[in-house]
Structures are given as C-alpha cells and as structure tokens.
Image (cartoon, grey):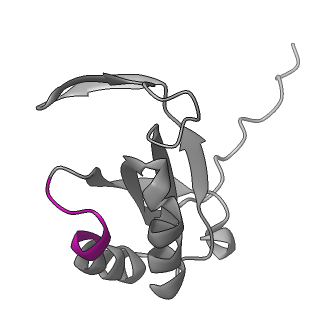
Amino acid sequence: MTAGPAPSTPPATHRRRKVEIIVEQTLVPAVLRMIDGCGAKGYTVLPTSSGRGHTGARGSAHVTGVFDNVMVIAVCEASVADRILAKAPTVVGPGVGVVWVSDVDVLRADHF
C-alpha cells in the first residue's frame, strides 16, 4: 500500500488590523485623505445599500445617491490603525458615521 501525498503546511500569516468606516458618500474624500495621511498602504471602498442602527433604518433615499452610505476598509499595521483611530473623530463625528477595528491575519504582509 502506498501513502498518499504528504499533508501541506499552511502558509505563514501576519497579524494586521482592519479598520472599517461607514460614512455618507459626501465624506468619503475626507476619509480617504485621512487614511492616506496616516500611512495606510491602501483601502477599499464599498457601497452599502441599507442597514439599521441606533438611529433606525437607513436606505438609499436620494436619486443621485449622494447621501448613500459607503464602507471604507483599510487593513494595516497596528501603529497605522492607531493613527487612523486617533484622527477618525475629526472626520466621523457623532451621528455622522461608525468606525470599528478588528484583528486580522493576512498572507502577504508586504501588501499591508
């Protein structure tokens, strides 16, 4: 009887922080400038269609979409995430948006 293929070793991962920010479309340029200024290597901007939070339900209410919510995601080193969190209140004030952070593991550390 022959043995099957040897089990593969999972690739090494690297700990990073994921910062997610939801704001109205009109605030996205300011959020992106802030993220760039804090040293993040990149970000992803995703449209959101609807949701519900402490102020109630929200969806697309304007024909142009200018007031639609958008999610901005940046995965970065902890020191960069800390700078983003320190500056976020200057862009994302009370009632304007939400910010949350989580630990993530990435395969390609040089990308983040």
Q: Position of residue 52 (x, y in %)?
A: 25, 23
Q: Position of residue 99 (x, y in %)?
A: 28, 54
- Which contiguous range is marked in magenta? 88-94
Residue under the point 40% across and 23% down: 50
Residue under the point 49% across and 86% down: 37
Screen quadrant of the C terminus: bottom right
Name above or below for residue 64 compared with residue 103.
above
Instruction: Left or right? Give the position of 53 relative to 7.
Output: left
Give the mark count. 0
Residue under the point 52% across and 77% down: 33
Instruction: Left or right? Give the position of 40 relative to 93.
Output: right
Specify whether residue 60 is in view: yes
User: Which residue is more in the foreground, 32 or 60?
Assistant: 60
User: Which residue is more in the foreground, 70 or 3?
Assistant: 70
Query: Most extreme residue toward the top, as rendered?
Result: 1
Q: Position of residue 67 (x, y in %)?
A: 44, 41
Name above or below for residue 107 compared with residue 78.
above
Name above or below for residue 107 compared with residue 83.
above
Q: Position of residue 10 (x, y in %)?
A: 64, 46
73 drawn magenta: no
User: Which residue is more in the foreground, 19 or 8?
Assistant: 19
Specify whether residue 76 is in view: no
93 drawn magenta: yes
Instruction: Left or right? Give the position of 42 relative to 69.
Output: right
User: Which residue is more in the foreground, 80 or 14?
Assistant: 80
Residue under the point 44% across and 64% down: 15
Screen quadrant of the N terminus: top right
Name above or below for residue 2 compared with residue 78.
above
Query: Most extreme residue toward the front, as rendered?
Result: 63
